[in-house]
Amino acid sequence: MRLPNANHTTIPGAAFRRLSDGQCRKLHEASLEILKRTGVRLHYQPAIDLLQEAGAGVSDGNRVRIPARLVESALSTVPSQVTLFSRQGAPAVPAGGHHTFFGTGSDCLNILDHRTGERRSPLLRDVVEGTIVGDALPNVDFVMSMFLPVDVPTLVADRYQMEAMLNNTTKPIVFVTTDLDGCIDAVKMAEVVAGGPAALRQRPLVACYVNVTNGLQHNAEALQKLLYTSGKGVPATYIPVALGGATAPITLAGNMAIWNAGCLVGLVLSQLKCEGAPFMTTGWGASALDMRTTVSPYVEPEKQFIAQELAHFNDLPMFALGGCSDSKCVDQQAGIEAALTLMANALAGSHLVHDMGYLESGLTGSLAQLVICDELVSWIRTALAEVEINDETLALDVIDAVGPDGHFLDARHTLRHFRGRWYPGLIDRHNHQDWLARDGQDLGQRASARVEQILAQHRPEPLPTNIQRHLRDIVQQAAGAAD
């Protein structure tokens, strides 16, 4: 299947499976048992009312037990693909099947400054620069804010982030907001850019990333944003957190059962609010505390592929995680962990893979690391691309003409096809002497230079002036209300 205007990965024969269908079914049934027997706490009355009216049991005020039939009904109406569009209205990210797309992350509390090497608090300028770099990189398919700026009012920082992203990229955007009011403003801004509510519903250029307390506790802000976006037809990712050994069992199966149960709560509510509403489940899970450091690591081998298997089992679009590292700097560990998680997601058929450029277990972002991840994705996409085998590529006549004593350097066949091989932009292939002549830089230094080159040369397509003013008015109105 060919996807118009989409930079996509399909893996017809290379997909890896860690779980059997039987194991997926057992995990899914365990999640249904949790919802039916244990139940979940919902901290938003309209969500409780929706479920109770549909036949869920409610006790102890907000403890809701959800029967399996509501889950199965929701699975029958939810779309199996969510498509995000470019600013120009072209389909850019058709998330479904085994199509894999890659993007940045949001809200890092620190930035590793590529100019100075300093770890510091981010500014709004960093959000702008991160968006520009993401817009320029060919293997970044969607953009997130990357950083949480400290030089704007905290309560409305999400509006400034949204304005910066809409102004500086034409690619799809996944946004995060602090509360429902921020979500309403973000959707309002997207509607301005798209051409109105109906246009945004028909061709959504944004999706909302909804963070949930954990699989068994669903906070009011998450539920409010889910119901609001479902009513608007704006895709939402509904991502509970469950830390093994803390808020979930330490075992992979028990941990994933709680993650999945939490996602299914969001699924059911989205379909009760608006049948057919676009919804995305989690593409990672079974995380656990590192019992030696009490850090929640981003790059654990144990959890890889499990959540993706469940998403495919239920034919749900998923929001996944990769291109990140637990390292504190752009070093060998950062490169290894980013490459492993990106490849794992490509093989798993993850759909939207976010957090490229993340370091320090999600606390720090790096633009240099982001451009390294872009190169890694280019390598992975090439490695997993379909191989073309035909008379022209087999070149039997050319082989016969050259024979065992000749060479192919001056063959017309070589001239026709040498550009079809993969050539790196950052990875170095020079001999030692030529490498030294080119300043002998390591990968991190070359990546920093690439960031500076992008920022000096790339100019994102600007929004019309009247739309820019409209976005500014929304931001200023929110900032004034917060004072």
Image (cartoon, rainbow, N blue to C red):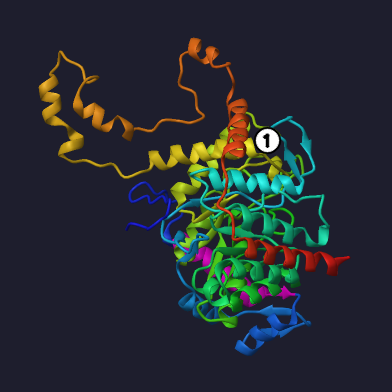
Q: Which residue is mark 1?
A: 327
Out of 102 and 272, give the one closest to the viewer: 102
Percent of width and height locating residue 33: 59, 72
Percent of width and height locating residue 102: 52, 49
> Is residue 261 among what the camera can see?
no
Q: Is residue 444 magenta?
A: no
Above or below for 228 versus 320: below
- Furthest-front residue in view? 465
> In the rendered image, which quarter is residue 182 located in?
bottom right
Region rendered in magenta? 22-42
Magenta highlight: main SS: helix
Percent of width and height locating residue 439: 58, 16
- Furthest-bottom residue in view? 53
Question: What kind of residue is marked 1?
Answer: Ser
Q: Residue at x 62, y 42 (%)?
A: 357
Percent of width and height locating residue 1: 32, 58
